[in-house]
């Protein structure tokens, strides 16, 4: 059975063809591209050679086919993905800007993306990680409860929880983030935030105080802090180190963080030293940014290690 499972929104992404074009302006879009943060994450796990499964839902339409065929082709277990007649697959419209920021319009309400129920996991064995995305928790209150219930089932079976807060203001809609993510943080072994997310969920004003607070919660073992173009910093109670990014020409940042998460966990599954886990994760994220589309980077074990062996990394 799958070593890593996740549960969350499965959707297609329709993207501006060039940076700086606002979503309210008439202009060209490209797509559909298979997407959804949990889907990008779990597809990367499979492409890196580990067994992977996703729980979610799509419509019985061509957009649903677009995503599911891609996931299955790459080896993801989609046996617990609902296909719902009469409802459309979720869609996200996205534009991005020269500073790396992005803006989304989500069409998730009244789609199967947030309708999956917590499945029976009694026959699922040998799962090492259950991965949670914050954006999935924000999709709807009911779906949030189903994800938390599923997480608790996997924890009871011995799985560890990894968590990317992946906060989307467009989905949060003024709700208290700590109420949403609290149950996950109580079980989180591996935390994979951005800097702003780390400060927000910790309630601290500095990275140092936030890291200390979270690593002393009695549960979290590793924080892999994603710093975008500045690379990443990995913290445990016993060590801390930073790693830059690989010298590539970025085309599209969408999905890079999700690929980082997946590759970092794959390194942990392979009992790699933390610094090598970070290199694998950074290489996978870099490969993803080198292609247009959230799941289109040429990510494989071979390509990841080619990049690492080249050591063409910026400080």
Image (tube, rainbow, N blue to C red):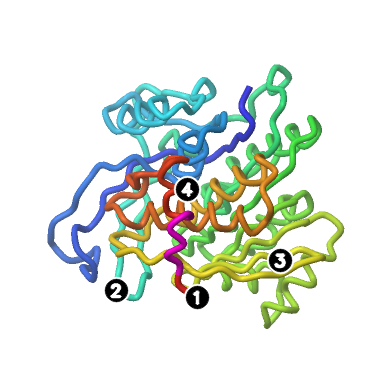
Element at label 3: strand
Does residue 271 belong to the magenta stretch? no
- In this rendering, the answer to whether 206 lies above or below 307 is below
Question: Residues at badges 3 and 2 in contact (C-beta under 8 Å)?
Answer: no
Residue picked out by circle 4 = 305
Residue at the location (53% across, 61% down)? 167
Q: Position of residue 210 (x, y in %)?
A: 72, 74
Marks 1, 2: nearer the viewer: 1
In the orientation shown, which residue stands out farthest toward the bottom? 205
Q: CA distance from mark 2 to mark 4?
A: 29 Å
Residue picked out by circle 2 = 98
Q: From the viewer's perspective, tell me whether residue 262 is left or right of residue 118.
A: left
Q: Position of residue 170 (x, y in %)?
A: 44, 61
Q: CA distance from mark 1 to mark 4?
A: 19 Å
Looking at the rendered structure, the number of numbered marks drawn on it comes to: 4
Residue at the location (59% across, 42% down)? 266
Q: Earlier in the sequence, mark 1 or mark 4?
A: 4
Q: From the viewer's perspective, tell me whether residue 188 is left or right of residue 300.
A: right
Element at label 1: loop
Q: CA distance from mark 1 to mark 2?
A: 21 Å
Q: Position of residue 285 (x, y in %)?
A: 45, 55
- Which of the 4 image quadrants contains residue 33? top left
Q: CA distance from mark 4 to mark 3?
A: 23 Å
Q: Please tell me the numbered disc located at residue 315.
A: 1
Span colored in magenta: 308-313
Quarter in which the N terminus is drawn: top right
């Amino acid at each position: 059975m799958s070593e890593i499972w996740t549960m969350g929104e499965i959707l297609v992404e329709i993207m501006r063809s060039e940076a700086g074009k606002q979503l309210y302006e008439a202009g060209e879009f490209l797509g559909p591209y298979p997407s959804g943060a949990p889907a990008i994450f779990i597809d990367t796990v499979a492409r890196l050679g580990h067994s992977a499964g996703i729980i979610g839902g799509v419509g019985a339409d061509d957009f649903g086919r677009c995503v599911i065929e891609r996931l299955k082709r790459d080896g993801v277990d989609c046996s617990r993905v609902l296909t719902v007649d009469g409802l459309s697959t979720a869609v996200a419209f996205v534009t991005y800007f020269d500073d790396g920021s992005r803006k989304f319009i989500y069409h998730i309400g009244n789609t199967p993306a947030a309708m999956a129920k917590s499945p029976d996991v009694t026959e699922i064995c040998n799962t090492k990680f259950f991965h949670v995305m914050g954006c999935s928790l924000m999709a709807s209150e009911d779906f949030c409860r189903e994800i938390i219930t599923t997480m608790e089932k996997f924890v009871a079976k011995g799985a560890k929880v990894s968590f990317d807060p992946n906060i989307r203001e467009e989905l949060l809609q003024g709700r208290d983030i700590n109420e949403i993510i609290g149950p996950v943080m109580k079980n989180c072994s591996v935390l994979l935030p951005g800097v702003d997310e780390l400060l927000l969920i910790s309630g601290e004003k500095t990275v140092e105080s936030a890291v200390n607070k979270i690593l002393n919660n009695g549960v979290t073992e590793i924080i892999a802090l994603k710093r975008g173009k500045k690379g990443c910093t990995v913290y445990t109670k016993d060590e801390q180190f930073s790693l830059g990014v690989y010298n590539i020409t970025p085309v599209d940042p969408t999905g890079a963080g999700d690929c980082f998460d997946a590759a970092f966990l794959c390194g942990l599954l392979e009992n790699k030293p933390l610094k090598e886990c970070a290199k694998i994760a950074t290489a996978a994220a870099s490969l993803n940014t080198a292609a247009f589309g959230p799941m289109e980077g040429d990510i494989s074990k071979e390509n990841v290690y080619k990049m690492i062996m080249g050591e063409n990394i910026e400080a």
